[in-house]
Amino acid sequence: MKTSKSIPSGIAAGAVAFFFLVCFGTGCQKARTVAAAPPPSILEMDTIPRTPARLARGQYLVEGLLQCPFCHSDNDFAQRPARPIQGKKDGGQDFGDFGLPKGNRIIAPNISSDAENGAGKWKDTVFVRALREGIGHDGRALFPLMPYKYFRSLSDDDLASVIVYERSMAPVHIEQPKTALTDDVRKTFQPLEPLAHVPEPDHFNRLAYGKYLVTVGHCDGCHTPQDERGNPIPGMDFAGGVDLSGPWGPDPKKIISVASLNLTPDPSGISYFDEQMFINVIRTGLVNARPLASIMPWGFFRNLSDEDLKAIFSYLRTLKPVQHRVDNTEAVRYCKRCRSKHGFGERN
């Protein structure tokens, strides 16, 4: 933590003498106002002060909207909702090649408080750089599976709370390998520019706050299809169809075909949802009798308050409607709109 230093008494006495000499020698003029330097941001502190309020807010965000343990833990998909395996929460996760060419391996690191294998020796500013700029504790640019381009929109206070809560997590003694990337992949992304300050969102403006929650919750990371270079396809914001297939069930050898749903208010999206239905879906993981795929982190989102879920739904209703049919109960077919394969893809 940065601390201020006292002014040496000799310098202070000299300054007083100079003041009297100038005033009485030339006549006092109205003193010029010198703006005080702003206090250092809490995010510049090596150790952010731990307070009950920050701990509670951080828990709410990490275990809800941000779902940090979902990527930084081995999860049990035999459970509904899927949850971190006991004793492995925040201990890291091996994503394998993540669909990249041979020679690449993506690792979500151990971010628990373990001093040997985790983040126990990291300063809080290391977390700030990772979440705001996409720079790891070892100075490397983080692979953008880590959603720092969304997390950087967290207000200063919310980011500080997230860090305080994460630092309170129990140590997990798991040693993870490091992410390995080929030069061809590494040159496709760069760290982001630092941010001086991100203000607190207006909690009383439901639409604005809903947009904030949807942004930092990185909803469009799974619900907006991308082209071959990883760029969002124009006109397809939140329209779904992103291939999320994987072993998301009791049998880890069985691949379940699943694509993200269209969240826009188009008839092919969730126009038939009302506010209460949206809350019920998030709370139960069911769209009427149809279960959401376990890769959808509804087990974290269900921890959000009704007011926050209402704000999210209010914002989703303002999205531009996009006609794009996605149905995970139907046979997978190529879709020319999202350039991927999913149920009802041939009908778009």
Image (cartoon, rainbow, N blue to C red):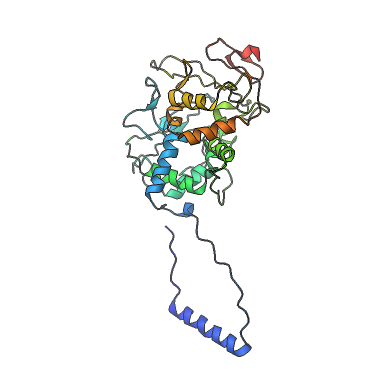
Q: Vertically, is 289 above or below 307?
A: above
Q: In which quadrant of the rendered image does the N terminus lie?
A: bottom left
Residue 271, percent from left and from top: 60, 22
Q: Residue at point 34% right, 32% down?
A: 88
Residue ranking furthest to the bottom: 25
Q: Vertically, is 315 above or below 330?
A: below
Residue 120, percent from left and from top: 36, 45
Residue 312, percent from left and from top: 54, 33
Q: Nearer the viewer, residue 185 or 169?
A: 169
Q: Residue at point 33% right, 36% down?
A: 172
Q: How many marks?
A: 0
Q: Nearer the viewer, residue 291 or 313?
A: 313
Residue ranking furthest to the top: 331
Tell me: 255 left or right of 240: left
Residue 346 seen in this snapshot: yes
Tell me: 281 left or right of 172: right
Residue 72: image quadrant is top left
Q: Nearer the viewer, residue 109 or 325?
A: 325
Residue 133: image quadrant is top right
Q: In which quadrant of the rendered image does the C terminus lie?
A: top right
Q: Residue at point 47% right, 31% down?
A: 106
Residue 144 seen in this snapshot: no
Residue 299, percent from left and from top: 42, 27
Residue ranking furthest to the right: 234
